[in-house]
Image (cartoon, rainbow, N blue to C red):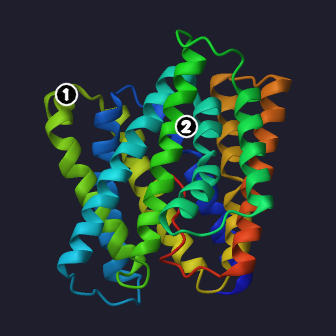
């Protein structure tokens, strides 16, 4: 893969991740069924990639690897379920921007868990994200769908931040595609008891959207992300993936007529600037390995 093709693959991956909320809204199924189906299709896609396209060997797992993969799978399940609840309740734009708050949680949690000093510029980034979230929500009435959806999406961002830190703790031990496959197996098994009663009622068209979520927005997007990091610097990848909310909101604007207000656009711009700045500042101190960089959504 050349640097140019790797950059193109990154943009395709970011677009696919950005379409997560759009496909979740198109699928007329419960968040539990969507997440179960997404994880199941993702396992098939990642297994295909690992068998035919990946040059990384499959490593035997030790007990501590299994415990960390189980924990990360549970966090991934909670992250996806809360995100799709936000999409159903408040729409793609608010769900995507609320989730994009995860860099702020990562800054705080890294300082607490890994006992790393929080720098002044990181505090500024947290404030920037907080102001952006205030602007994104038109009001703070807990009974309103917008506020409820924002809270679910922020919870999704918190869980994703915990997932990223869990992946960081186990970085280097398990190849990223193998880890992603195992995590999706955990997600599918966790959601099966909840999703099973309603699976027979899911329409064929909804299975199409869910299948696209699993194959393209999870399996293929993650594989492109990992493959491109062999050529592209992680800081470049982080900046490209900061476009994920832009892609998602733009498509939702076209498909669902979710017209964001000027206030929401300003809040979204602040959050995206915070994501880019956080990624650039973090990558200057240490260049993450592919398995250390958790792919979004």
Q: Which residue is mark 2?
A: 154
**Residue depicted at 39% across the width and 52% down the height:** 214
Residue 30 appears left or right of 229: left
Q: Residues within 10 Å of mark 2 (few under 14, many from 20)?
A: many
Which quadrant would residue 54 be assigned to in this image? Answer: bottom left
Task: Name the one closer to the observer, 216 or 183.
Answer: 183
The location of residue 190, given as percent across then percent down, is 20, 47
Specify the quadrant of the image occupied by residue 154. Answer: top right
Q: Please identify the quadrant where the N terminus is shown.
A: bottom right
Nearest the eye: 58 or 135? 135
Q: Position of residue 58 (x, y in %)?
A: 28, 86
Looking at the picture, tell me which residue is in the foreground, 102 or 50: 102
The reply to whether residue 182 is in sight is no
The mark total stands at 2
In the image, 122 versus 58, the foreground residue is 122
> Residue 287 at what x, y percent from top left?
65, 82
Relative horizontal placement of residue 138, taking residue 171 as reference (left or right): right
Viewer-nearest of discs 1 and 2: 2
Query: Cα distance, mark 1 to mark 2?
Result: 27 Å
Q: Which mark is residue 198?
A: 1
Q: Is residue 156 above or below residue 189?
A: above
| Picture residue at 63% right of the left edge, 61% below the top | 12
Q: Is residue 27 above or below residue 222?
A: above
- The reply to whether callout 1 and callout 2 are in contact (CB within 8 Å) is no
């Amino acid at each position: 893969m050349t640097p140019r093709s790797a950059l193109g693959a990154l943009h395709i991956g970011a677009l696919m991740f950005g379409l997560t909320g759009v496909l979740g809204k198109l699928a007329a199924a419960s968040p539990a069924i969507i997440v179960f189906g997404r994880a199941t299709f993702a396992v098939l896609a990642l297994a295909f990639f690992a068998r035919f396209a990946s040059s990384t060997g499959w490593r035997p797992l030790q007990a501590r690897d299994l415990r960390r993969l189980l924990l990360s799978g549970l966090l991934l399940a909670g992250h996806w379920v809360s995100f799709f609840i936000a999409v159903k309740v408040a729409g793609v734009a608010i769900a995507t921007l609320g989730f994009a708050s995860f860099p702020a949680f990562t800054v705080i949690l890294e300082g607490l868990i890994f006992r790393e000093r929080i720098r002044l510029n990181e505090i500024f980034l947290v404030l920037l994200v907080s102001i952006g979230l205030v602007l994104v929500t038109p009001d703070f009435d807990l009974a309103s769908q917008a506020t409820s959806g924002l809270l679910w999406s922020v919870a999704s961002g918190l869980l994703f931040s915990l997932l990223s830190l869990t992946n960081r703790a186990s970085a280097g031990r398990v190849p990223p595609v193998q880890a992603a496959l195992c995590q999706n197996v955990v997600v599918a098994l966790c959601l099966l008891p909840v999703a099973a009663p309603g699976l027979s009622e899911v329409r064929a068209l909804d299975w199409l959207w869910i299948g696209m979520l699993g194959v393209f927005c999870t399996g293929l997007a993650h594989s492109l992300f990992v493959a491109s990091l062999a050529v592209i610097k992680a800081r470049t990848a982080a900046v490209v993936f900061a476009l994920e909310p832009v892609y998602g909101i733009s498509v939702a604007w076209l498909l669902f007529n979710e017209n964001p207000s000027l206030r929401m656009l300003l809040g979204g711009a602040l959050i995206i600037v915070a994501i880019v700045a956080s990624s650039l500042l973090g990558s200057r101190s240490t260049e993450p390995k592919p398995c250390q960089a958790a792919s979004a959504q």
